[in-house]
Image: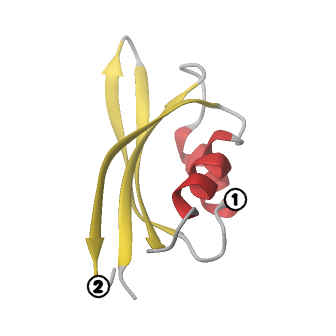
Amino acid sequence: MAIVIVTYKVFPTEVEVDLDDLCTRIRDGLPEEASISRSSVEPIAFGLKALVLDVAMPEEEGITDRIEGSIRSRDGVGELQVISQRRTLRV
């Protein structure tokens, strides 16, 4: 089965949100079959930073909706943007 890697940009609700803590809470809240394969912080403007996450998941119907719902449900998440989506045979 192929693996899909989706790159998300997560914008916090405010500048003061601890992005390391937010990443940990997102990781802990993901469905069992998904994992964060890479994370980084990207400066946006005026002190605002976004969390950029590569989330690896199996290629199955409906999983991206579950992942996005899980990410959006975390306190501190303001906006969620899909940057890219690619298919691979393994992570």
Disc 1 marks a residue whose amino acid type is Gly
The label number, if any, that marks residue 5 in the structure image = none
Q: Position of residue 57 (x, y in %)?
A: 47, 71
Disc 2 marks a residue whose amino acid type is Leu
Q: Position of residue 59 (x, y in %)?
A: 44, 74
Disc 2 crowd, CA 10 A, few/some/many (<14, 14-19, 20+): few
SS class, disc 1: helix
Q: Residue tagged by mark 1?
A: 29
Marks 1 and 2 sit apart, C-alpha to C-alpha, by 24 Å
Q: Position of residue 8 (x, y in %)?
A: 41, 46
Left or right: 28 in relation to 65: right
**Relative to residue 51, is residue 12 depicted above or below?**
above
| For discs 1 and 2, the disc positioned in front in the rendered view | 2
Q: Which is more toward the observer, 87 or 72?
A: 87
SS class, disc 2: loop
- Give the mark, 1 or 2, whose residue is nearer the N terminus: 1
State the residue lying farthest toward the front. 61
Identify the image quadrant of residue 16.
Answer: top right
Q: Position of residue 10 (x, y in %)?
A: 48, 37
State the residue lying farthest toward the top. 46
Q: Residue tagged by mark 2?
A: 89
Left or right: 33 in relation to 46: right
Q: Quadrant of the N terminus?
A: bottom left
Disc 1 crowd, CA 10 A, few/some/many (<14, 14-19, 20+): some
Residue lying at 60% horizontally and 29% vertically, measured from the top left: 17
